[in-house]
Image (cartoon, rainbow, N blue to C red):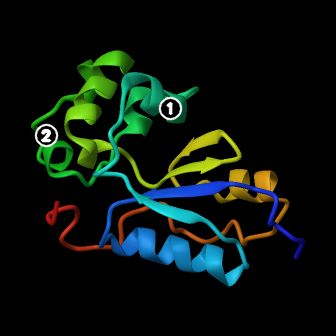
């Protein structure tokens, strides 16, 4: 493992999310340091949030386990990217987690291949840590 003291890594999580906890443990087990911020408590703007969604389809921006998505209260297939981002600014539980900022490169979701590429590390890409592992998904907002 190389010396990673030269990078700036921010992990935006939902505090208490068991999936985010497992993702952070995996990073720590590879001696990757990062700062943690609450995705729900961050004051998002269209500009700051849209950076994480470049190249993604609207459906890939949403947390499928958020109650409004799971219960089909929001039809994400009918939303434009701008409409989706505006909804997420008002209700950040809708955002797919985690959001990662690694040296200014913004990532939506726990993309191990991208993390490996950006940090020149070798985390096992067979780990399935980009899905919710909780039976009571996103109920404690």
Q: Nearer the viewer, mark 2 or mark 1?
A: 1
Q: Residue at x 14, y 63 (%)?
A: 139
User: Compared with residue 140, is residue 76 higher up or lower down, i.e. above or below?
Assistant: above
- Within 10 Å of disc 2 (Cα), the crowding (few <14, some 14-19, many 20+) is few
Query: Which image quadrant for residue 61?
Result: top left
- SS of the residue at dot 2? loop
State the image coordinates of residue 133 (x, y, percent, origin top left): 35, 72
Q: Is residue 14 left or right of residue 135?
A: right
Residue at horizontal 58 percent and vertical 44 percent from the top: 107
Relative side of 76 to 136, left or right: right
Find residue 25 and report its horizontal and vertical position in percent: 55, 80
Q: CA distance from mark 2 to mark 1?
A: 22 Å
What residue appears at the point 52 percent right and 58 percent down from the top-left corner?
11
- Residue most extreme to the bottom: 29
138 lies left or right of 29: left
- Front-most of 21 and 67? 21
Q: Quadrant of the N terminus?
A: bottom right
> Relative to residue 56, is residue 131 depicted above or below?
below
State whether residue 31 is above or below residue 5.
Answer: below
Nearer the N terminus, badge 2 or badge 1?
1
Q: Position of residue 53 (x, y in %)?
A: 50, 32
> Percent from the top left, x then y, of residue 39?
36, 52
Q: Secondary structure at mark 1?
A: helix
Residues under numbered marks 2 and 1 in contact, where contact means CB atoms less than 8 Å apart: no
Q: Is 32 or 108 nearer to us in this picture?
A: 32
**Which residue carries the number 2 mark?**
72
Is any atom of residue 70 visible in this view?
yes
Q: Quadrant of the C terminus?
A: bottom left
Is residue 80 visible to us here?
Answer: no
At a point 43% along the width and 32% down the height, the residue shown is: 49
Q: Circle 1 is placed at which residue position?
A: 53
Q: Is residue 122 above or below residue 7?
A: below
């Amino acid at each position: 493992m190389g010396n990673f003291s030269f990078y700036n890594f921010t992990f935006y999580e939902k505090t208490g999310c068991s999936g985010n906890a497992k993702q952070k443990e995996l990073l720590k087990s590879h001696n990757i340091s990062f700062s943690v911020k609450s995705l729900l408590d961050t004051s998002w703007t269209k500009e700051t949030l849209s950076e994480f969604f470049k190249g993604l389809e609207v459906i890939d921006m949403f947390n499928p386990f958020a109650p409004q998505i799971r219960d089909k209260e929001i039809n994400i297939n009918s939303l434009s990217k701008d409409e989706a981002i505006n909804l997420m600014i008002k209700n950040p539980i809708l955002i797919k987690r985690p959001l990662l900022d690694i040296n200014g490169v913004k990532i939506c979701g726990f993309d191990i291949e991208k993390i490996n590429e950006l940090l020149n590390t070798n985390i096992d890409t067979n780990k399935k840590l980009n899905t919710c592992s909780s039976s009571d998904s996103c109920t404690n907002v």
